[in-house]
Amino acid sequence: MAGSVDGGDTDVRTRPVLDWARVALDAPDGLAVITSDGRFAQINPAGVRLCGRPESELIGAPAPFALAPERGMEPVGLFEDGSMEQVTRWSPKPGVRREFSYRAQRLPAEPALTVVAFRDVTDERHRWRRIAAVARTAANLTSQGSLSAMLDALASEVLKTDAVAGVQIMTLDGGSRELRIMGQAGFRYWPDFFERLLLCQRRGAALRMLDALHGRKPIVVPNRWALIRDDPAWEPLRDYLAELKWESFVSIPLLARGNAVGVLNVFFAPGQVIGQRTLEFLLAMAEQAAIAVDYAALLQQERDVARREERQRLARDLHDSIVQQVFSISMQAKSMEVVGERGDAVPAETVRRFADEVGLLSRTVLADLRAMVHELRPSSSAELGGLEEAVRALVDSTANRTGLRFTLSVGQGLEHIRGEMAEDVYRIVAEAIHNIVKHAQASKVTIRLHRRDDRLWATVTDDGRRIGAVQADSCRRTAGYGLKMMRERAERWGGTLTVKPRRACGTVVRLVMPATVEAPAVARGLAVPITPVSAMTSGPTSGPTSAPTSAAGGRAS
């Protein structure tokens, strides 16, 4: 029936008009009247429930609402619609924080009063912050320069998003199977943390994170701090753990390719509820951390392979050039010995010919050895005179040894390229020159190094055989090893390496990489040996569950 309400037969036009005061009292959202000095004057029952305090405490108390838009108003987020609603924070009691979305309107009849309609958006905004945190963490996997930087950023995201007290990320060392702290937030650095942790374990404090690691399931321990505070086994680390105001503990295993590679430990502030959504968020962040750890392990494997291949290449070069040349010198010396044993006078011309050949071979061996020394230890040259001097020394050595004509063009700003980055750039240029000498049959090489727009550009161009012809011959395998090593060094710093043939003849190798990236950091902290859960002697050992363990069990974070 048109015009009826609630399915009844009464027309809305004939229904008695409801008292707006009654409507305000029964409204599902909070309604409040605020004085000009920002205090509660009136509030409906829904508003009292949202604020979490008795009405008698709220009337006359400062309200959290801004009566007019302010310059510092919170900006619209990625997932918000840009409406005129503002967001404010309210703390009904210590340790509890709520977020209200509200609209404010001054009363025309009472300009000194403002009516505010508000609702609780804590869970909604928390959910969006978690989504954004996962997205930012995924982006950090490609933008951070090292594993520790990635995991520090991830720990900070967890800390900020869920307002927890502290976060630790520990990873397993692949060779020794020992745990190391690789990321943390909230905790300050203690140089002897691991020594104290091992002492706690020896005193009978078992580590709950090991249950998560071995069981490959999350461990949730409510009221964990109370158990640790009363357990004498934790005395060596009690001051450290007491620095944060926390209550409950969660440990999430980091799983990559079916294997446990570490744990994400989260320390929750008092009053925080660890629900299913919280665990889902932590599992998502643990998955991102596991991807970062797995990626770093794969990258390290690639580096190890590149080093082995580089050593194999140097061994081949030694055999192909220096060993054969030294063998030729020994043969010349043997020939001189045979001639001398005859007892006949040796013509001066013969002696000069032997001497010239031995001298030429000796100079060639010396030049090859100097070139290999430059390839093996470029860092000392880079540290003393910078990347430019190291490359110039390599160019001069190669030109004297091979007769190639080099043109070297160096721009400004290279003096800031030092350390590991300078060494990797040097080795890329050295490998490009090595390939030209071995395979290109070139006569001229042009090298350009310069900085532009905070990026380092390096090109090595030759006029010999094009790369297609080089890769088609028997040298394809050795050239492939070198190119793989060059690309690995470039990608280590977020750069790219391209190798392309020139139109007429020859090949151009181009390196482009950020010139402001920090060196990959070394893992912080000491190792913690992993003791199998079955070997722990303090208290009963429970499986991976979310139930709390009694204080007598001596369970640890």
Image (cartoon, rainbow, N blue to C red):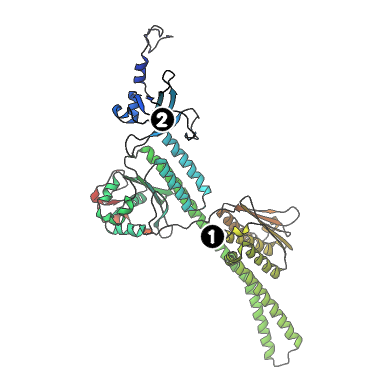
Describe the element under mark 2 as helix, strand or loop: loop
Alpha carbons under labels 1 and 2: distance apart: 61 Å
Residue 289 image position (x, y, % from top left): 45, 48
Kind of residue indicated by mark 1: Val
Describe the element under mark 1 as helix, strand or loop: helix
Q: Residue at x 29, y 59 (%)?
A: 202
Could you classify mark 2 by the number of other residues whose Cα lies within 10 Å: few (under 14), some (14-19), or many (20 or more)? many
Q: Residue at x 41, y 20 (%)?
A: 110
Q: Can residue 286 be spotted in the picture?
A: yes
User: Label 1 belongs to which residue?
Assistant: 305
- Return the disc, 1 or 2, that comes first in the chain's sequence: 2
Task: Pick whichever, 289 or 480, lies toward us.
Answer: 289
Task: Pick whichever, 209 or 90, lies toward us.
Answer: 90
Q: Are marks 1 and 2 in contact (CB under 8 Å)?
A: no
Quadrant into which the N terminus falls: top left
User: Label 2 belongs to which residue?
Assistant: 65
Residue 406 image position (x, y, % from top left): 72, 63
Kind of residue indicated by mark 2: Phe
